Structure formats: structure tokens, C-alpha cells
Image (cartoon, grey):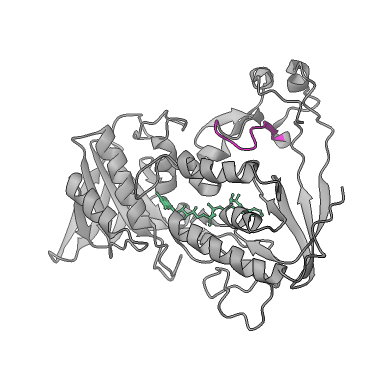
Amino acid sequence: MTAAIEAAEAGCEVVLVEKSAYLGGRVARFHQYFPKLCPPACGVEINLKRLKNNRQVTILTQAELESLSGGPGDYEAVIKLAPRYVTDACTLCDECVKGCPADVADEFNYNLSKTKAIHLPHAMAYPAKYVVERSACPEACHACVDACAYRAIDLTQKAEKKTLRVASVIVATGWAPYDASKIENLGFGRCSNVVTNVMVERFAAANGPTGGKILRPSDGKEPRSVAFVQCAGSRDQNHLPYCSAVCCSASLKHATYIRKLYPEAEITIFYIDLRTPGNLQNFYTKVTAENKIELIKGKVGKVEEDPATKEVVVTAEDVLHETKIKRNYDLVVLATGMVPQTAGLPAVVDLDEFGFVNNVNTHVNTGVYGTGCVKRPAEVSGTIRDATGAALKALQITVGAEHLGVEQHG
Ligand SMILES: Cc1cc2nc3c(=O)[nH]c(=O)nc-3n(C[C@H](O)[C@H](O)[C@H](O)COP(=O)(O)OP(=O)(O)OC[C@H]3O[C@@H](n4cnc5c(N)ncnc54)[C@H](O)[C@@H]3O)c2cc1C
């Protein structure tokens, strides 16, 4: 979003191609974001306002790059667009949702709750438009169509393609959380009260699956003790060999969520090294000074479930005291890292040894630039700075290619 708006405000015509049904990326799913611990809507809204007010930007949602041919200054990009099945006649009256008989896992909530096959992706979604998950619709069901007084639902819509001629491409496809079930010793999927950091964001959010409460999934009780396991799968040759840069700051943030909800809860963070890059040292100092948090330097070796109490039994080393620890917790949070999202990117995009987009080692200027977490893990302010830089690079290719503009075909 930042790269798009920066390029547009500098005078370029920009097409923003977003795979999901709404803008905002992973940040839209946070409860709060560090360092200020403000709601994500603050930052996202500012960018949305700039985007909405700028006629130079065309926003395509449910859209992906299918192919890219040509070269710097003159690329042909074919975009495929999935049907939304809801037209601009929609007034958001919600009658379609009330009439829909089919439940579907709510992807916005990391599948922790259900929504209807026709749904608004989330309350603050932009574009503010319903979307239909057709694979979940019962055969021949037209309940939403019948419920809509504005004839805004068209279940016959088909996928479309658009061909764009562009000078430059910015790849900002971001990250996905590492699959915690692959880290066998840490108990995710095996122990009911082991969750991940991205799940905590949704539990803490008022519009999340538990209405803002962080509870033990096994029985819905308030946790009296919570442990955070840092580097869950990160800096580990068997999983993600790299550091994801934000997980320590994210767990410190999550500790503030717990402390606010449960002033008496015991909070422990097991870490290898507490790293807070991105000028977040002050955040670390403030959070640890204001919230009673026990920091234990040591790798967690084993996470098991006590079958009687459903408590989570954590076995870890305590490096500084040269001992081994075995402790029970009500809830364990795995601080999993970021996996760059590069599937389907054109061959011209160079990837580094860890699978991130590599701008540095490209010998020729391709006019295709990675930015944000698909390039390297970073906090929001770092990705915003990086996106402005990517826009500048793209502008330099665009100058001299003014003849192109954007040709769109249905
Ligand atoms: C647990 C956790 C908590 C965090 N908390 C904070 C915090 O409090 N403060 C902070 O500053 N940072 C935080 N971060 C870091 C923050 O999430 C990132 O800095 C931010 O998401 C990076 O934005 P991005 O645009 O690079 O990627 P993303 O947010 O992943 O956005 C990428 C966008 O690209 C879209 N996309 C993906 N693939 C395609 C495709 N093929 N075609 C078209 N579109 C596609 C996605 O749908 C998405 O909209 C946290 C990270 C984690 C793991």
C-alpha cells in the first residue's frame, strides 16, 4: 500500500494487485501494534485515505499476477481476477448474511471461528464489500440472492483477466506464519493449550473469535500462567534457519495483552537471545519495566500436556543458572516466524538462500523490486521506509517510459 501510494503521489499511474478480498495485509489482523500499541486501523486508515483520494491508483482485489513478460520499462503483466459475486449495488444491509445457510472457516481469524459463505472479510474491510466463498455454498443454493433486495449478488460471475503494460513491478507479497505443527517437540496440535503468536492477536482483538479474551482453548478458562517460547522453529536448520526479527517484540507486546487482562498472571518468556531490531530497544525496556515478566534464557526442548489438568508442561534449559526447568503453564504461546510469500512470482524475481526476494545480488536492473517482509522480516515502520525506497527505484524506471500507462482489457 505504501509503495503504491508513494509512486502515485509522485505522479505515476499505479495498479495495486491484492490477492485477498481486502487491503491491509497481516497488520489488519493485529489487535495492537508496537511500539505505540495503537490499533492497526490507525495506520491502515491513513494509507487507505491516501489511496482512495488518489485517482492514479487502480485497486484490484482477489487479483494475482499470472504472467509477466517484456523487460524494464515495458512489461506486460497479465492479472487474473477471481469473481466476488457481489456488485457495487450492495448497500451492506447484511440481509444476505442472515439468509445464508452455509458456515465456512473464517480465514481472517486464522480459521479459529466460523463465518457465513457470504461475508464481509472483516468489519473495517476495504473495499467494504461482501464476498462469496462459492466452494462452501450448498448445491443450487440461492438464499443470498433471494435475500438481497438490491439485486447486488450475481452468482454467475466468472474469473477475468486484465493485461497491463507497466514500466516496473514492486513485489510486496509479504509473509505467512510458519506452520507450527511441523515443530513436533513444541506440542502444537497435540496439546490443546498451545497456541501461536498470530492466534493471540486474534484472541486479543475485540472483533476476534473470543471477543477480546485470551482463554485456555481446552476449557475457556482464564489462564493464570502463560509461557512464550521464542524462536519456535526459527534459527533452526530443520525449520527456518533465519531470525524473523519481530517475534521477540511481538511476544513482549503479547505479554502486555495478558497483563492488561490478567494483572496477577505469571508470565514467562523463554528465549535464546532477546532481539528487538528496528529501534525497539526502548519498547523492550518499557514493557519489561512495567509488566512483571520473567525472562529465562534457554531453549525449550519439550512441550507436553498433562492429561488430567490439560496444563502444558514445559521442559527448558536455564542457561544463566545452568539448570534444567520443568514447569506447568495454563497456556503456551509459540513465537513462530515469517515465511516469505513467493509462490507464483515471475522468474525474473531472484530469491536468496532463505527464499526472500533478493534485490541486492541482481546483476542487471530488472525493474522488478521486492519490498517489505517478502524481502526481509521487519516491523511495520521498517517495511514502510523500505516501500518508499522501492517506489523511488520504480520511479526511475518509469521516467522515460511515459508512453506506457495502463492498458486494461476485460
Ligand atoms: C506475531 C507478529 C506480530 C507482529 N506485530 C507487529 C507489531 O506490533 N508492530 C510492527 O511494527 N510489526 C509487527 N509485525 C510485523 C508486521 O506483520 C510486518 O512488518 C508487516 O506485516 C509487513 O507488511 P508487508 O506488506 O510486507 O506484508 P503483509 O502484511 O504480509 O502483506 C502482504 C500483502 O500481499 C498480499 N499477497 C500475498 N501474496 C500475494 C500475491 N501472490 N498476489 C497479490 N497479493 C498477494 C497479502 O494478501 C497481503 O495483503 C508482527 C509480525 C508477527 C509475526
Q: Main secondary structure of the magenta part?
A: loop
Q: Quadrant of residue 139?
A: top right
- Residue 306, can we see it? no
Q: Is residue 280 magenta?
A: no
Towards the viewer: 132 or 196? 132
Towards the viewer: 126 or 358? 126
What range of the chain is rendered magenta?
123-133
* Rendered location of residue 203, percent (x, y): 41, 36
- Residue 101, can we see it? yes
* Rendered location of residue 397, percent (x, y): 69, 71
Residue pictured at 28% horizontal, 45% vertical: 255
* Rendered location of residue 323, percent (x, y): 14, 63
Residue pictured at 27% horizontal, 60% vertical: 281
Q: Could you tell me how many numbered marks the image carries?
A: 0
Residue pictured at 72% horizontal, 56% vertical: 13
Q: Quadrant of residue 82?
A: top right
Towards the viewer: 309 or 26? 26
* Rendered location of residue 21, percent (x, y): 65, 41
Classify residue 354 as left or right of residue 212. right
Seen from this angle, which residue lies furthest left?
321
Residue pictured at 32% horizontal, 61% vertical: 276
